[in-house]
Image (cartoon, grey):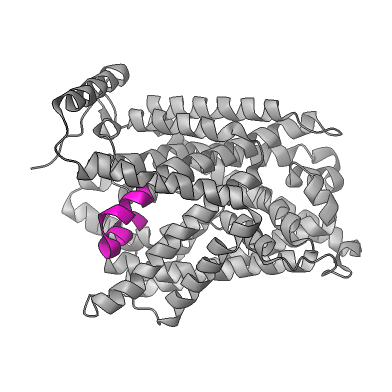
Amino acid sequence: MVSTDTDLKELGGLNTGEKLGNDEKVQMKKQLGLLEGVAIILGIIFGSGIFISPKGVIQEVGSVGLSLAVWVLCGLLSMIGALCYAELGTSIPRSGGDYAYIHEAFGELPSFLYLWAANLIFVPTTNAIMALTFAEYILQPFFPNCPIPDSSVRIIAALTICILTFINCYDVKETSKMQNIIMFAKIAALGIVIIAGLAWLALGHVENYTNIFDQTTTNPGKIAVAFYAGIFSYSGWNYLNFMTEELKDPYKNLPRAIYISLPLVTLIYGLANVAYLAVLNPTEMIASRAIAVSLGDRVLGPIAWIMPLLVATSAFGGLSVHIMTSSRMCFVGARNGHFPAMLSHINVTRFSPTPALVFLCILSLLMLCTSDVFVLITYCSIVESFFIMLSVTAILWLRYTRPNMVRPIKIPLWVPISFVIICAFLVVVPCYTRPFEVGMGAFITASGIPAYFFGFVWTKKPAWLLNFDMKVTHTVQKLFMSAREEKDD
C-alpha cells in the first residue's frame, strides 16, 4: 500500500528533487538525523487502521489475552520485515520498491504481476477500506442505537472517493496542505483513546481482564486472519527504506530508527488495545461498527462527539494522500512499458496523472460491493503478504546467486528466513478458513499472466490493434487534457 509523499519519489512520480541543484540535494540529504527518521517512520505507520482493526483481531481470536499477543507479534513481525527491506533498499537502490526488488531477483513476469496485483487489489482495496472507515465514523453518531444501513455507508464512501479523486486531479497542492491536520487528528484520537481507557482501568473497571484467555480459538486459520487485521494497522513499515537518501549516515541511522520506532509503535498500539478492551468487552467490540466511538460514548460523556470527528478527519485525510500517491504506481508501470501508455500521461497544466487517478477511482468504487472492511482487509492483505514474502525471498536468492553483491546493510541470514516462514504460514493457512478471498486474490493476480504476454511479450501486433490502441490513447489525451510524459534523452 502506498501512503506517503516519500513514496511518490520512489514510485517514479513527481520527483521534485530532480528540480534541485546538486548543492541543494546534498543539503536536503543532510537535513534528516535519527530523530527525524523516527518521526517519519511514525508518520508513515500511524493511520486509521488502529481504529478499525482491533475489532477484526478480537473477532477472530475470541479472547482478550490472545488479541493483545497478536498485536505485539504483529509489531515484532513488522520490525523483522523492516530490517529485511533495509538490506533490499540499500542493495538495490532503484525506484519502485517491491517492484524493483522482485524485478532484480526474479525478472519481468513476477515484477509485472506485482504491479498488476497492486493496482487491481492493494490500492483500490485500501482506498475502499479508508472510505468505508470515514463513512462509518461519520454516520455512527446518527445511528447510536441501531445498525447503520449498508447502502448509506457505501454511498458516502463512494462520494468521498469521487470527491477526493477530483480534488487530486484539480490541484494536488490541496492534498499536501492537509498533512498537518491529519497528523494532529491521528495523534489526538490515539491519545484520547489511551488516556480514557487507562483512566477507566485506574477507576477499578478491571472486569474485562479476568480470565483473559477464556474463549481463545485454537483454529490456526482464524489466528492467521487475525494477524492480517493487525498487520494492516502496521502497514507502511515496508516503505522505511525509501528515506535512505535523506538520512545522515543512513547505514547506521536506518537500523537505529527501526529499532526505536517500531517498538514505540507496538507499545502505542498495545496501549490502545488495552484501552479498548478495558472499556468494551469482546462481545461489545464485535458488535460495534466504530469502536472508538463506542469507547467515547461510554467514558467521555458530553465531549464524546470529538472521537468520530477526529477519526473521520484522519481517515479522510489519509484517503486523500493515498489516492494521490498510489496513482504514481500506475505511472511508473506505464513508464516502464508494463501498463498502457495512457496511464503515464501528465496533465498539460499541472503535474497530476489524471488518467491513472480516474482508473483507480473506478476500481476503488468496484471494491465497495461490500461494506465489510474486514473482508476487504483479508482480501488485500493475503495477496500483499505473498508479494512481500517474495520480496524478502529475493534476499535469500541474491545471497545465493550474487554473493559478491554490494550490501551496505547486511542482516543475519536467520532474519529473512524467519520472515519468509512466517509469511508462508500467513499465506497458506487462510486457504482453509477464507477460501473465497484467497481464491479471488489468486485469480486476479493470475489474470496478469495472459495480460503480460498479450501486452508485453507479443510485440508483433496487427495494425488494426495498434490503431485501436492509438485511438484510445488519443481519446484519453483529449478527455483529460493530458500529454505523454516527456522522456530525457
Magenta stretch, residue numbers: 95-115
Q: Residue at x 20, y 34 (%)?
A: 485
- Residue 278 x %, y %: 83, 59
As drawn, 74 above or below 320: below
Residue 362, horizontal then vertical, whole percent:
46, 29
The quadrant the C terminus occupies is top left
164 w.r.t. 338: above or below = above
Left or right of residue 115, residue 159 in this image: right
- The one nearer the camera, 136 or 206, is 136
User: Which image quadrant is residue 370 in?
Assistant: top right
- Would residue 263 be seen by someone viewing this image from the given angle? no
Residue at image coords 41%, 42%: 119
Is 439 left, or right, of 302 in this rendering? left
Is residue 451 on the magenta stretch?
Answer: no
Please tell me which residue lies in front, 26 or 182: 182
Is 157 left, or right, of 173 in this rendering? Answer: right
Measuring from the top left, give residue 14's x and y in whole percent: 29, 41
Dominant SS of magenta comes to helix
Residue 237, horizontal then vertical, whole percent: 48, 60
